[in-house]
Image (cartoon, rainbow, N blue to C red):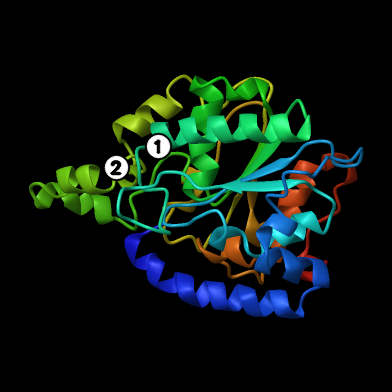
């Protein structure tokens, strides 16, 4: 997400914390003490949910603030859930996802192996928000992740980069600006549409065999622009527009991951398609 979006994070955290207080006891406990809910390394997947779920935060996010709502939502439904921090820069606490994305994918590789070793599962599912829905594709395509992952679900992922509301179109008019972004925050530079990273990631096709892909996008995305650039082409792909599920849903780039239970409901359908239930505006009460 954009650097100025960090200003919304305190408000988002307060909102989610308040929601946790009125949610079922299990959700409130998970939000206040993640180790007792998600990132519980003694959790063993059940027959109903045999694969652990790895949550991958977005740019400027971290392993807890991006998932204060969705992680308990999954835990309360019987999933073993894990989240990681990646893309840290020296001297920058809390705000992650800023390092080179290929290196972030290497961190995901190590984390998935840890999850599989702890749970005894042969494969995991991944749900990512923003960069977190795009970065795992590098892991799947170039680091052998396809043999360890059953499904990748992206919430507003920037799969083909973004112009950041046209911001990147202005860079040629400011000599040195693009080099500064690349040096200071390479994770942002890698997400610019047409970047060397994006070209490598999408060359030869968007998907790899054996993995199921779901993209959940919102028409009101102000970061992934145009919003349809989130969509993937290839076999085993399902692209969903949130407003086709619920016309009244006004979620934008941040809230689709942080607070939107309609998006979460559809994500769970992707994790367990055999027991999928139609997602509607009423799914907010599920």
Q: Earlier in the sequence, mark 2 or mark 1?
A: 1
| Mark 2 vs mark 1, CA separation in Å | 8 Å
In this view, 220 is above or below 210: below
In this view, 128 is above or below 247: above
Q: In the rendering, at what x and y percent does residue 281 appear?
A: 76, 68
- Compare residues 114 and 68 and report the one nearer the observer: 114
Q: In the rendering, at what x and y percent does residue 14 appear?
A: 56, 78
Q: Which residue is mark 1?
A: 101
Q: Which residue is mark 2?
A: 186
- Tell me, yes or no, if residue 264 can be seen here: no
Q: Which mark is residue 3?
A: none
Which residue is pictured at 34% across the width and 41% down the height? 193
Locate the C terminus by quadrant.
Answer: bottom right
Q: In the rendering, at what x and y percent does residue 11 appear?
A: 50, 77
Q: Is residue 283 left or right of residue 274?
A: left
Which residue is pictured at 76% across the width and 55% down the height? 74
Q: Quadrant of residue 113?
A: top right
Characterize the local packing of mark 1: few (<14), some (14-19) or many (20 or more) Cα atoms within 10 angstroms.
many
In this view, 180 is above or below 6: above
Judged from the image, the secondary structure of the residue bearing numbered disc 2 is helix
- Compare residues 283 and 43 and report the one nearer the observer: 43
Which residue is the extreme one toward the left?
175
Q: Is residue 122 left or right of residue 238?
A: right
Q: Is residue 250 left or right of residue 43?
A: left
Locate the N terminus by quadrant.
Answer: bottom left
Q: Is residue 92 left or right of residue 179?
A: right
Judged from the image, the secondary structure of the residue bearing numbered disc 1 is helix
- Tell me, yes or no, if residue 182 can be seen here: yes
Asked whether the residues under the numbered discs 2 and 1 touch, taking CB atoms below 8 Å apart as contact, a structural biologist would say: yes
In this view, 6 is above or below 41: below
């Amino acid at each position: 997400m954009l650097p100025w979006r960090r200003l919304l994070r305190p408000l988002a955290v307060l909102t989610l914390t308040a929601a946790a207080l009125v949610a079922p006891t299990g959700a409130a406990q998970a939000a206040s003490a993640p180790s007792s809910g998600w990132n519980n390394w003694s959790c063993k997947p059940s027959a109903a949910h045999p694969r652990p779920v790895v949550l991958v935060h977005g740019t400027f996010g971290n392993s807890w603030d991006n998932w204060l709502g969705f992680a308990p939502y999954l835990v309360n439904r019987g999933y073993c859930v894990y989240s990681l921090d990646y893309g840290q820069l020296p001297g920058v606490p809390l705000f992650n996802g800023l390092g080179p994305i290929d290196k972030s994918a290497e961190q995901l590789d190590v984390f998935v192996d840890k999850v599989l070793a702890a749970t005894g599962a042969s494969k995991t599912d991944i749900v990512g928000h923003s960069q977190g829905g795009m970065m795992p594709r590098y892991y799947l395509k170039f680091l052998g992740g396809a043999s360890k992952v059953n499904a990748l679900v992206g919430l507003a992922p920037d799969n083909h980069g973004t112009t950041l509301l046209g911001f990147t179109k202005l860079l040629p008019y400011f000599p040195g600006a693009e080099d500064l972004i690349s040096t200071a925050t390479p994770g942002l530079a890698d997400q610019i549409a047409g970047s060397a990273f994006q070209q490598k990631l999408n060359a030869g096709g968007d998907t790899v065999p054996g993995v199921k892909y779901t993209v959940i996008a919102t028409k009101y995305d102000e970061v992934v622009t145009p919003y349809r650039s989130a969509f993937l082409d290839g076999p085993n792909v399902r692209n969903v527009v949130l407003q086709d599920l619920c016309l009244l849903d006004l979620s934008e780039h941040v809230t689709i991951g942080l607070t939107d239970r309609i998006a979460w409901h559809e994500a769970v359908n992707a994790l367990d398609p055999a027991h999928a239930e139609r997602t509607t505006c009423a799914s907010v009460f599920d």
